[in-house]
Amino acid sequence: MSFPYSNPQSATRQNFQVSLDTQSNFGISYSVSNTGGYMEVASLSDLVWDFSGQTGYVTGSTIPIQFFKGTGAGYSPNILSLNSDYWSSGRRRLGMLVYVYETDKIYQYQIDKYETLWNAATAATNTVIFTDFGASVMSTTAQGVSLISAWTGSTIEGQSGVTRDNARWRIFRGTDTQITGGTYVLSASTIELFNSTGGTISITGVTTGTSGTSGSSGSSGTSGSSGTSGSSGSSGTSGSSGTSGSSGSSGTSGSSGSSGTSGSSGTSGSSGTSGTSPSFPYPLVYGLFAQTASSATVTNTTTETSIIGSGVGTLSVPANGFSVGDSFTGRIVGHISSRNNDTIQIKIKTDSIILGDTGLVTMPQTTNKHYTIDLNFTIRAIGAAGVASIVSGIVFTYSKDASNAFEGSDFSIINNTTFNTTISNTLDVTIQWGAAAIQNSIYSEYFVLNKVY
């Protein structure tokens, strides 16, 4: 499929423009509080999103994404939450620009071949779960891991050996083509210049400089004249010696030709740091199971029968898979008919262990009415039976024929005697009628189970 871009929507919307009074001296919001667009930060470390040492919903970044770091168990994957444009998460959005005061540069956020990663993830089974206001990408497949790794990487061009080719944050040089670097290849007498689009310009035929010529020798100086002889008689005084001629000046040396400069070798690009395995936040929930077909109709029988239909995901937690505080919520919606004064009983079970029981609920006359069962669980302690503890709650509501009024039943219960986290646990919800009658019937159309903590 092609990339399904649309302007993002959220659960909260407004239908008017927000403005300030003309005399106001403050703004509406800070740029770093927005999703995408243009922001300003102090240092390069503000571009880095780091979840090392964290599990659950990751926090603590200047420009974060929405990410849940799972425990690695089958029921606790890593999950990335995307907004409904599918190319933004948290406050990051593809193409956004950020000015960094530390380097006095602008950086642009980019994921190469994003459409290819997206198409692979959405084509994989149980990897991308769509909601009304976005999508959750699960680390349950290799395609999901690849898409999440692209979002969790925070490599920066020019830092720690990261090049432009493998950086998430790239130096923004405008939309015009610019020369970003170059090298001289001595063996080929070629200069290679690199531009901002990733292209290369080659200049060939570059030669080195020749040596300069030697300077000529200077001429020799002339000899001085001889002195005159003294007169006869007494010895005359000796004539003084003539002065020696001065030496000629030496010729200056010729200047040497300068050698051509060698181009420096280009630096090797280091591998970009790997993004981590995926994960999730959204509105603080992620799905474990979604029913995709209506259940069988339980009618004209007093046999205890499951009300859950087939679906995707899992209702099972492996042995020793629970942690203290693990919390779950579920909702079942369907249709019910009942005979006046007949009873119905709803049980929440894990295999044969009962986690909750409405007891006998006396029904009024209902004819093809809607009903809802809301389920809630929290693990209080883990261990074998007698040590482990779970608190469960249920709210069962329906509308009756008379005045179409709502009625129902609810309860909460703590099981700290038979619940056991050292064995595998599989959730089930069962229905049992007090009388076999064709007027008594119930089936489910919708059931979703979420882990909320």
Image: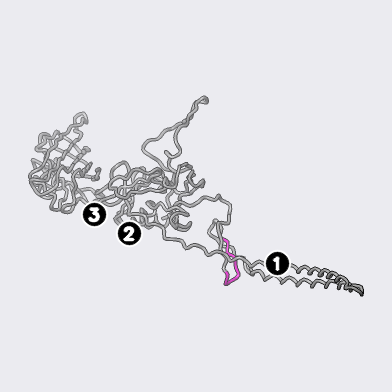
Name the side, left or right, on which 378 lies relative to 47.
left
**For the N terminus, which image quadrant?**
bottom left
Q: What stretch is highlighted in magenta?
A: 186-193
Mark 2 / mark 1, whichever is N-terminal: 2
- Mark 3–mark 2 CB contact (< 8 Å): no
Comparing marks 3 and 1, which lies closer to the viewer?
Answer: 1
Name the side, left or right, on which 423 lies relative to 94.
left
Local secondary structure at mark 3: loop
Amino acid tagged 3:
Gly
Amino acid tagged 2:
Ala
Amino acid tagged 1:
Ser
Residue depicted at 8% across the width and 40% down the height: 434
Depth order, front residue of 210/157: 210
Q: Distance between the residues labelled 3 and 2?
A: 14 Å
Q: Taking 403 as reference, is 203 above or below it?
A: below
- For the view shown, which residue lies furthest in the right direction? 232
**Residue 167 forms part of the magenta stretch:** no
Residue depicted at 42% across the width and 43% down the height: 8
Mark 3 / mark 1, whichever is N-terminal: 3
Query: Which residue does the numbered mark 2 point to in the structure image?
Result: 142
Q: Taking 252 as reference, is 438 above or below it?
A: above
Q: Taking 26 as reference, is 293 above or below it?
A: below
Query: Which residue does the numbered mark 3 point to in the structure image?
Result: 74
